[in-house]
Amino acid sequence: MKRLLALFLISGSCVGQDYLNQYTSHAEMLEQLKQLGVKTQQIGSSRSGKSIVVAQFGDEKSPAVLVTGNVDGDYLVGTELAMRLIEDLKSGKVERNGKSIFIVPMPNPDATNFMLGKNGYSTTFNHLETDDDNDLKTNEDGPNDLNNDGFISQLRITDRSGLYKPSEQAPNLLVKVDPLKNEEGQYRVLNEGKDDDGDGQLDEDGYGGAAINKNFTYNYDYFGVGSGVNQASEPETRALIDFVIDHQNILITVNFSKYDNLHENWPAKKVIVSEYKRPLEAFDKMPKEDVDSYKLFSNLWLEDHKDWTVSAKNRGQGTFHDWAYFHGGRWSIATNGWNFKQITIAKTSEDKNKNDTDVAENKDDNKKSTDAKISDTKESRLVANAKSKGLQGAVVPWTKIAHPDFADEQVEVGGFRLAYLNNPDVAVFAQTKSSEYVTSLTTLFPKLKVSQSVEKLGNDLYRVTLKIKNTGKLPTQSAMGKLTRWMLPVRVQWNLPKENFIGGSKRTLLAPIEAHGGQQEIKWLINTKGHRNASFEISSPVIDAVKQTVKFGA
């Protein structure tokens, strides 16, 4: 049972089976798209040959929004939200407002399928084989299912010099101690595994490859773990880059991601575009002119997602959402798609009695505030959610094992399954208004209103003046798009021969026109001999074209 609409109606959990079975595999995604009757096209293949497909709503060349799922690979939530958007568009629950929407639900299918496979573990890597420990072997020392429960979780080794101790709120949950406060740990923590190749290291060369969301050209991490052989070396990366380059009509990209630039925007420069000098330096901040648009994107999201607590970074190295703006010039949004505050945990009578006792005994307001902050964490809510829903394989009970590499130490397997930290029970994000948010972006596109005036100056000589006004909520071109020259400007094109233009030209490229009534005025001197009228078109790939006819005197 994978379809989201069905899952959201179900209370309870997938008792007796891996809770990750709620999430969509590559084969299931393709089958769902087929059943829905959605128009799709393959835009590339992964390292292992799995197809990367885009679902299309609307015309191929109309102004468009591009939505991507889990470019990270291990962020399964991204695919689910992308698939839900496809279902909502198909059912008519949300509207496109005359714009096109392209959706790539699974840009990194290798990592996703590995996670959902037997003994899979959380990874962002595709199937590029790599020698991580430089021993001329590949993938020979990865995690191991030491307690044969079908899951890869954690090892905790009793060690008073370790950095972890059990949480007071949830014994299964380990929390970091603060050495600067003289707190004493009880355990050191490793991923579940052993030294398969006998080099004295654990899990140093497991399922390797390239992390697609580290492989894009902007702010690339040279020689970084998972960055790939070079920029855009991976077929999955090139599939997305090529699709964006081939579709100049994409104005906005939305990536459901571990990153988030809606709750904390990118930093901005005080300098405006006209003050930049060429050759351009590398960008690490947005131009001043783009700040208000990103505030608009944030405010729209926060209207339906108030009181969210999101600690995700707003940028990484070599990420898709950074590349789409800083190199591609498109408005680029990254959003987590879920928030741990959405996990509601019903208090038991025991909890209520304990709270009453705490309130009665605790006279220190500062201490109460600190205790509440410590207990209300993402990890503690996830532990409680797994317990209340009976989520199999989310949080594994600690059990003692005999570990071949730690023969004289007390070792236990259990704790958090790594995938669970980013991919909760799907019911957690059932109320996320992600589909509504994406379609609300289609109401922001620039929209042109054109007025004309014609003045006769002499025989067959006319001055034509056009006033071009942008009544939309976004400028006709982002300032970054103008700087990088990857986003096409608005163009005015006449049908007259170029010889007829005495002042002005047959084709004119316009500077970005500001939103909310920004206006530009352009004038031409035209020799109209042989023409009683002429037509022009004002257009760009991201704006609905305006066509008008100018009538000259008899």
Image (cartoon, rainbow, N blue to C red):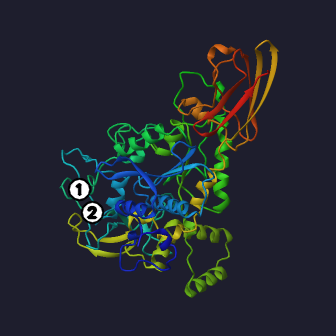
Question: Considering depth in this image, is 26 or 327 the residue closer to the camera?
Answer: 26
Instruction: Tell me the quarter of the picture where residue 270 sits.
Output: top right
Residue 280: % across, % down: 54, 25
Q: Residue at x 52, y 66 (%)?
A: 378
Question: Considering depth in this image, is 232 or 541 the residue closer to the camera?
Answer: 541
Instruction: Tell me the quarter of the picture where residue 290 sits.
Output: top right
Question: In this rendering, is residue 44 above or below 492?
Answer: below
Question: In this rendering, is residue 445 above or below 168?
Answer: above
How many circles with numbers are drawn on the protein?
2
Is 282 on the left-hand or right-hand side of 391? right
Residue 30: % across, % down: 38, 59
Quadrant holding the N terminus: bottom left
Indicate which disc residue 141 carries. 1
Whether residue 419 is visible, yes or no, is yes
Local SS, label 2? loop
Is 468 on the left-hand or right-hand side of 102? right
Q: Disc 1 vs disc 2: Cβ atoms closer than 8 Å?
A: yes
Indicate which disc residue 67 carries. none
Quadrant holding the C terminus: top right
Question: Considering depth in this image, is 262 or 405 the residue closer to the camera?
Answer: 262
Whether residue 123 is visible, yes or no, is no
Instruction: Give the alpha-carbon distance from disc 1 to disc 2, as whole Å.
Output: 9 Å
Question: Considering depth in this image, is 40 or 401 the residue closer to the camera?
Answer: 40
Q: Give neighbour class at mark 1: few <14, some 14-19, many 20+ (Cα, 10 Å).
A: many
Amino acid on which disc 1 is placed: Asp
Residue 114: % across, % down: 31, 59
Indicate which disc residue 193 carries. 2
